[in-house]
Image (cartoon, rainbow, N blue to C red):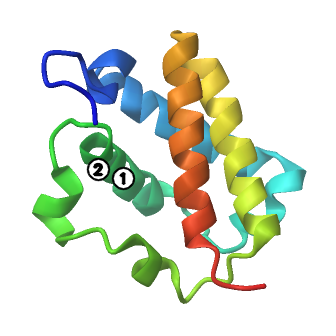
Amino acid sequence: MQPSNLPNHYQRIGGADKVRQLVQRFYQLMDELPEAYGIRKLHPESLQGSEDKLFKFLSGWMGGPQLFVQEYGHPLLRQRHFPFPIADAERDQWLMCMDAALEEVVEEAALRQELKAAFLKVANHMRNRA
């Protein structure tokens, strides 16, 4: 747990604008990279709704405003994603896109590494297929 007098991830990344930039770049990469096809096909044709939900989730997850919770209730991530087949391949594709977006958007190297480690934990937890 981080002491309350230190800036949280939301503050360190640069607030809402930077979180939105990260999410937008993440979905651009998912949409553009052929090697992300497996994860892309699990999403609707338009990524706008997914982008909005991820922005709202990450805002609260990083320590900022709890936008997702205010609109949708508790994230229940694993439960909400259970209808989608997520195995190692999908996890790895998601992480590939997020890691690349983090490299492009997040200037602070230590923060990038902290977020990558946190995303890896969540991505591993999301797997629901062998």
Q: Amino acid at mark 2?
A: Lys
Residue 84 is situated, as x and y percent measured from the top left of the image, at: 61, 83
Which residue is rendered at x = 18% and y = 51% of the image? 67
Q: Can residue 123 be seen from the camera position used here?
A: yes
Classify mark 1: helix, strand or loop.
Answer: helix
| Residue behind mark 1 | 52
Q: Residue at x 14, y 25 (%)?
A: 4
- Residue nearest the observer in this picture, 17 or 64: 64
Image location of residue 72, percent across then percent down: 20, 70
Q: Position of residue 123 (x, y in %)?
A: 59, 59
How packed mark 2 is, by other alpha carbons closer than 10 Å (few <14, some 14-19, many 20 or more), is many
Which of the pair 87/83 is nearer the observer? Answer: 87
Q: Quarter holding the N terminus?
A: top left
Residue ID at (16%, 49%): 66
Which residue position is annotated with label 2?
56
Q: Residues within 10 Å of mark 1 (few under 14, many from 20)?
A: some
Mark 1 is on which residue type? Asp
Cβ–Cβ below 8 Å for labels 1 and 2?
Answer: yes
In this view, the residue farthest toward the right is 34
**What is the quadrant of residue 15 in the picture?**
top left
Find the distance from the CA under tag 1 to the CA under tag 2: 6 Å
Q: Tell which tag, 1 or 2, sits nearer the viewer.
A: 2
Q: Nearer the viewer, residue 117 or 98?
A: 117
